[in-house]
Amino acid sequence: MNSPVEQFREQYARKSDRSRQDIAMQNLISYGPIESSVRVICTIPVHYEERYLLRTLGEYSKQDDLSSFELFLLVNGKRGADITTSPAYNSILEGRQKYPKLNVAVTGTVYPDKGLRIGLVRKDAAMLALTRAAQSGVDVENLILVTNDADSINIPEDYFTQIIKRFDDNPKLGGLAGFVDYPREDFYGSHLFLSVQRFVDIVEVIQRYKNNHLVMRAGNAAFRVRDYMSAGGHTRSRISETRPLYRWIRSAGGEVQFDPQVRIVTSARRQITAIANDIPQSQRYQSFGMEGDLANHYQIAESRLEIPEVCQKVTSSQFPALLEREIQSVYNRYITALYRQVSRSSDRERNLSKSIEDAYARAVMFRPQAVANIQNLMRRAGFFTGIKLDFEGHVVSIRNIYVLKKLILQKFNNY
C-alpha cells in the first residue's frame, strides 16, 4: 500500500507535475536525512535570479531552536536556465557555509517559459519536501508545513517556536495564518504604498470579524501536514493559492486561525516597483514568472537591495489622484470576482466584455445586495484609514483625505 505522501502525489499531481518533480528529486542536494527533532518543514520557492537570499538565510540562522525545522528551497527557473550556476543557487551554497547549523535541503527544476504560477511552484515544493521526509522515515502526517518567501527580511527569533506551540496547544488546528508586513523605511518612501496597504489590511480585518473570512497570505502560512494533504495542497493559481486550503480544513471540522503575533516582515520591492512603473498594486502579480515581470526591474544588484525612489508623499498634488486610482483598482477586483460568481451561478452566456462597466452591470443585475455590501465594506475601511469614499456606478471617488494626511504627517513628519 502506498504511503500517505505517495497517495497525495498520485491523486493531486498531473503527469507533467510528476515529471518535473522527478527531475527535482534527482537534483536534490541535502545534508543527510531529516533529524528526528524536526517538527517543521519550511518550503521556500526561489527564483533562479534571486540575489538577496543570503540575507534571508541569515534571518533563519537566528532562530532560537535550529534543530526544530528544516528549510526546503526549490530553485525555479524557465526552461533552458542553468539553475546550478544561478545567483540563487550560489547564495544557497554560500549560506550553507556561512550558517552550517541550518538544516537545509535544496533542489531545482524548470518551468514553461510563460504562465508560471506561484501556486504550482508552492505545490511542487511541498510535494518534494514531504517526499524527502517520507523517505527519511519521519512521521510526515504530524509535521507542520510552513510556506515562506525568499525575500523575508525580519523573522522573529521564536517564529517557528510560536508556530509549533500553536499547533501543540490545539489538536484541531489545521491551518495558521500569520501577518505579513513591510519595512517602515519602505512606507517612508511612499505614502501611497502605506495608505493602500493599510486600507487593504483594514478591509481584511473587517471581513475576518464580520464574515469569518480569513485571508491566508502564502508567504506566512502553516498547515498540519495531514490536513494539507487531505485538502489537496495549494492550487495552481497565480494568487490566492491558499484560500481553498482553509475552506477545506473548515469544512472537514478543523480550525484555521489568524494570529498577528506570528509575524514576519518582507521586502516591499515588488509593490514599490509596481507603483514606480505605474502599475496598480492589485495587478502586481499578473505577470509573475513571465517575461517582463516586475522582478526583472529589481534583480539588479548583488550587494544591496535597490528599490526605485518613489517619493509619493501625501503632500504631493498628485497624491489624491494616485490614491483614487489604487482604490479603484481594489474595487474593480471585488466587482470582477463577484461578476465571475454570477457568471458561474447563472446559465447565461459568459462571453461578455471584460470591461469593469459590464462586470458591474451584471453584478448589480444579479447580486445588488452583494455590490452594496462591497461598497459599505470599502467605506468603512476608508473611514478607519482616514479617507471618505463615494460610489457612482462602477466609479469610486475620494471625497476627502484630510484625516489620512494629518495622521501620516504626524507619524512621518521627518520624511
Image (cartoon, grey):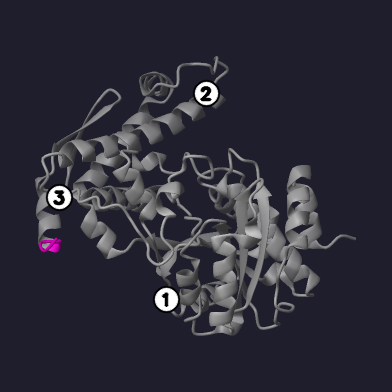
Query: Which residue corresponds to the image point at 49% horizontal and 71% vertical from the top-left?
Result: 54
Crowding near pointer 1: few (<14 within 10 Å), some, many (20+)?
some
Q: Identify which amino acid the numbered label 1 is placed on.
A: Pro
Q: Identify which amino acid the numbered label 2 is placed on.
A: Ser
Q: Is residue 232 visible?
A: no
**Disc on the earlier residue, 1 or 3:** 1
For residue 188, side relative to residue 86 (left or right): left
Crowding near pointer 2: few (<14 within 10 Å), some, many (20+)?
some
Q: Element at badge 3?
A: helix
Q: Element at badge 1?
A: loop
Tag 1 and tag 3, C-beta contact below 8 Å:
no
Label 1: which residue? 156
Label of residue 404 in the image = 3
Q: Which residues are magenta?
A: 411-415
**Disc on the earlier residue, 2 or 3:** 2
Q: Identify which amino acid the numbered label 3 is placed on.
A: Leu
Nearer the camera: disc 1 or disc 2 = 1
The image position of residue 49, as x and y in percent, is 53, 56
The image position of residue 69, as x and y in percent, is 60, 76
Label of residue 392 in the image = none
Label 2: which residue? 343
Q: Is residue 223 above or below residue 21?
A: below
Nearer the camera: disc 2 or disc 3 = 3
Query: Which residue corresponds to the image point at 76% horizontal and 55% vertical from the top-left?
Result: 23
Tag 1 and tag 2, C-beta contact below 8 Å:
no
Mark pair 1, 2: CA separation = 44 Å
Residue in front for this viewpoint, 218 or 367 = 218
